[in-house]
Amino acid sequence: MRRDERLFVFFDTETTGTNTVFDQVLQFAAILTNDQLEEVDRFEIRCRCLPWIVPAPMALKVTGVTPDMLDDQSLPSFYDMMSAIRKKLENWGPAIYAGYNSMRFDEPLMQRALWQALHPPYLTVTNNNARMDILPLVQAASHLFEGVFNYPKTPRGRTGFKLDQLAPLNGFAHENAHDALADVEATIFIARILAEKCSELWASNVATTGKSDMASKLAPGEPFLFVEYFISGPSVWWGQRIDQHGASTSAASCLRLDANWNEIFTLDDEALQKQLTTSPKPLRDIALNKAPIVFDQATARALGYEPDADILAQSKFLASSEEACAKLLQTAAALKEPWPEAEHLEQRIFEGFPSREDTARMEEFHRVDWPGKAALIRSFEDERLQQLAQRLVYASAPEALSEADRKSMADAIAVRLHDDHGDPDLWRTIPQAIEELSEVRSAQGGDAIAAEIEGWLADVESRYPAAPVSG
């Protein structure tokens, strides 16, 4: 393997559901490749279900995870799985991490899973690692490279991009769809087609997976071509960055060059605010570390996109209007609604990094045995880390906790499992899962699976019964 060779880690997860905040990773699979997308190594692992997690019944049916597997003591615990994943990925790195719809699903799930296991959550974007997503490239190819892929159709007749349909249509035998390792193999198959037949798209995206590389491409004063995809279809537009933060920020503030900024900059504050909320939004924040599909002028021309005179005129005008652009950014910042305050532990991942002392305690937590881990719980300065540590000990070695702490955890889990919160953005409860069983029963062969899940839910309820209703 060449020293200058970029490695890729293609990965996928299977989970208890689609909620990226409250659902749990049950299976992780990854394949390490060289820059020719040839396999170098592979890794797969499953784990048991955490006691406070209620899987979506339909997710179990789709992924083939049986209720017996949720409590299978021969499988690793959640903590042991995440520890093994961290070790493997650190041994493989640095690399470019790639999945299929990974930016919206697998990445946020894995970040929280690592954090909840007291491991560094941003593994894929630190220590010279970077990331990309194959789904947006396939969507872009449907517009920029017509005829390369055969695409499925959605029930409404639109172009579809689901991996379990796309891969077979293009020659991949995908009998085990929704198994993490099979989905990784399918993703690599699609990536190879992109690299071979959409080389400008592939090479441009790979070259800007790093945050600093993307920041260089989105240099202020330089027009770029941006490609994105909505339910209604592709959107391709010329833009230009106007902030001066380089790679020191998470996103670049970019203006669409098809807007008339000569006129917009003359608007009063109220009219300017209204203009910024129109659709399509003339001001966009483009993430620097999520490998957006951006082309410089030379690559755009090779793809048949030439900026016309109006686009170039707007670009030149913006480059000479730094003061007006700065005012525009201030106006836009004032329009942003504050991030909602997190109420539950899983939502609090972004409330700050651990102190140097807590970081050292986290590493010590991983070195000692379970009684040693339990002894460290209250030594963390960050109360979030105290809660996460206590959860981990309870799930893997409850006997290491005091009787009072065990009872406190069991009571809290019972409340969560039976909570009548009615909020679709929060965790799934036992009553909600029982209601969702009707969907499983209506599917082919669903009666037997639904009965197994119902039995598992009853067993969980017997271990964590609802508190009696006081009269």
Image: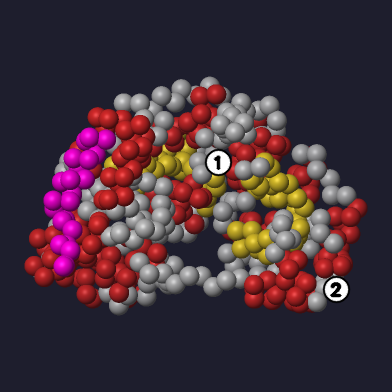
Looking at the picture, which amino acid does disc 1 mark?
Ile
Q: Report which residue position mark 1 lands on.
A: 134
Residue at the location (36% across, 30% down)?
A: 443
Would you say 7 lies left or right of 451 here? Answer: right
Would you say 127 lies left or right of 459 here? Answer: right
Residue 244 in the magenta stretch? The answer is no
- In front here: 31 or 312? 312
**Would you say residue 287 is visible in this rendering?**
yes
Q: Residues within 10 Å of mark 1 (few under 14, many from 20)?
A: many
**Would you say residue 36 is visible in this rendering?**
no
- Identify the colour scheme used: secondary structure
Chain part drawn in magenta: 450-471
Q: Residue 376 at x, y = what percent?
A: 20, 71
Q: Residue 289 at x, y = what percent?
A: 56, 57
**SS for callout 2:** loop
Q: Report which residue position mark 2 lands on.
A: 266
Kindly indicate the quadrant of the structure image that contains residue 313. Answer: bottom right
Q: Nearer the viewer, mark 2 or mark 1?
A: 2
Quadrant where the C terminus sits is bottom left
